[in-house]
Amino acid sequence: MTDLSNEDKLILLQHAISKYEDENTLLEKLKAVLPQKDIDRGIATLIGTQRVRRIGPDVLQNNISHIGELPEIPLHIKEIIDTL
């Protein structure tokens, strides 16, 4: 796998969250792509910057009302998202 920048990881997480809102499912799918530490740090960053919000104990949702649309998917990330 190619090294992803921090911004690439955040874009990947946002699009993965739109695909799987359940946090447990999301973590299982992303473990094959990112280390647990990067996943946890990315989710915390997205919540802190209000791009993602937590709904209930284990549901994550993109905060579309705050950010508008999801960021454009770069080609090297699109392949990863399609395989999730």
Image: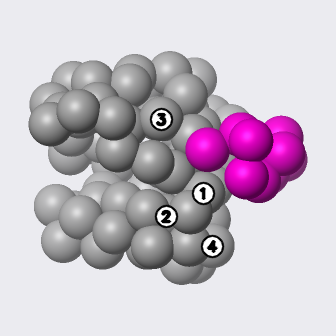
Residue beneath the point at 56% across and 72% down: 49
Q: Residues within 10 Å of mark 2 (few under 14, many from 20)?
A: some
Residue beneath the point at 40% across and 22% down: 20
Name the amino acid, label 1: Arg
Q: Residue tagged by mark 3?
A: 61
Q: Residue tagged by mark 1?
A: 51
Q: Residues within 10 Å of mark 1 (few under 14, many from 20)?
A: many
Do residues under tags 2 and 4 come within 8 Å of each other at their CB atoms? Answer: no
Dot 3 lies on which element? strand
Q: Residue tagged by mark 4?
A: 7
Q: Position of residue 32 (x, y in %)?
A: 24, 42
- Stretch in magenta: 63-76
Measured Cα–Cα span from mark 3 to mark 2: 10 Å
Dot 4 lies on which element? helix
Instruction: Specify which label sits upstream in the sequence, 1 or 3.
Output: 1
* Label annotation for residue 5: none
Q: Position of residue 40 (x, y in %)?
A: 24, 64
